[in-house]
Image (cartoon, helix red, strand yellow):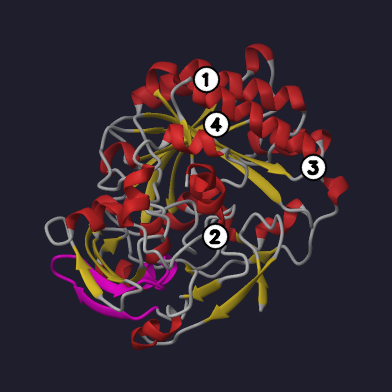
Amino acid sequence: MRELSSWGRLGRVPHDVVRPAFLDDLGAASAAAPHLCYGMGRSYGDVCLNAGGRLIVTDALDHIISFDRERGILRAEAGLTIDRLLRVTVPHGWFAPVVPGTKYVTLGGAVANDVHGKNHEHVGTFGAHVSALGLLRSSAEMLTLTHDENAELFAATIGGLGLTGVIAWVELQLAPIRSAMIDTETFALNDLADFFKRAEESRDWTYTVAWIDCLAKGAQTGRGFFSRGRHAEKGDLTVHKQPGLAAPFDAPGMLLNAHTISAFNWLIRHRPFAYGEKRVHYDPFLFPLDGVAHWNRLYGRRGFFQHQSAVPMANAFDTTRKLLELTAEFGEGSFLIVLKLFGDEPSPGLVSFPLPGATLALDFPNKGESTRRLLDRMEGVVLAAGGRLYPAKDAAMSADAFRTGYPAWRKLEAQRDPAIMSDFWRRVTAEAA
């Protein structure tokens, strides 16, 4: 048995770990039950863990099967990361249609969590660009899933948290680009109303995102900065570089307090040349945290929680304000608060996270019971607004919150491979079994 954790590092749990090198090895790897696939481990909570069971680590299954450079259609094994995909496709003028905040995720993980990016308003989720999947069931069947072939299982697999089978390969429609550069504009935000105003004015921009100072109170609640970007029409097609920095060890717990976070927030807001128009490479704009390898160590040995919620637009302003006020009230500030809007583009997945409205993501150092109380309070605010929490980032969601936020969960359970299980699924469905 080998101990593994998720990106939140809230605890290491024992697993029977196998690491197949070829697709032909998947059958033997998935013979044990219960099993679950594990890509790069970038999920923050327990959705990628299967304590006491088998984990099939897929990072070696990273071969490109085919790449149509004229049409931008790529088929690759599910362990291929977005990092490696971009290294191959960018020089040919193609980009991943949707990317999360890190490029160190596998295609299989991107499908299983139906990840979203800063361009959701225009293109929807990752799953909306998947044309076909190869899925190995515990019955030893290797199925091809498309919108037309095995359509119900296709819908359950996109955003299905890896529960419907082992994703063997993914076929993806890429997006054309003419440059590796992004034209950007960044504005200071005085308060939360400023964010919604800027977001409304920026609907014709491909990418939009805001960073929020979590400790600001009163009239300044929601202050921070807003960035928008679009792929430049001209420029070279140079791929990204490896991270230049790394967190070499776990930060001391005393480092993470309201004073240091307040100082960090001040420095971020007052960076020289932070605002205005710039042309930057896609890497720092789309993947800012990837610039520091192992950044999760900055939260110390006890790890961290993330709250990410989505709430309908009708309640977005009031709900976001309440969540920020709760964070300030508890004094458990976050180095990272990201605020974005989701659009109306539907996902093909049964239980995908995004809904039309706003999404707020906050990291909290694990301070034990006080942090869990804060997360419980925030969960209540989100549910009251008709919103839901993100399973890929969650480590504390209640079973009621999951079943309320994802009413189609029973349809996913009906499609779940009986030999596959995760700690997350046990936690949120056990009482209803």
Mark 4 in CB contact with mark 3 (< 8 angstroms):
no
According to the image, label 3 marks what residue? 367
Q: Which mark identifies residue 71? A: none
Name which residue lies at 36% across and 44% down. 410
Quadrant (top left/top right/bottom left/bottom right) for the N terminus: bottom right
According to the image, label 4 marks what residue? 225
Q: Residues within 10 Å of mark 1 (few under 14, many from 20)?
A: many
Q: Quadrant of residue 361?
A: top right
According to the image, label 2 marks what residue? 42
* Three-letter residue code for mark 1: Thr
The mark nearer the N terminus, 2 or 3, is: 2
The image shows residue 319 at horizontal and vertical percentages of 52, 20
Q: Is residue 162 above or below residue 14?
A: above
Point out the stretch of residues depicted in magenta.
Answer: 62-87
CA gap between label 4 and label 2 equals 26 Å
**Left or right of residue 97, residue 309 in this image:** right
The mark nearer the N terminus, 1 or 4, is: 4
Q: Which of pointers 4 and 2 indicates the residue nearer the eye?
A: 2
* Three-letter residue code for mark 2: Arg
Q: Residues within 10 Å of mark 4 (few under 14, many from 20)?
A: many
Q: Residues within 10 Å of mark 2 (few under 14, many from 20)?
A: some
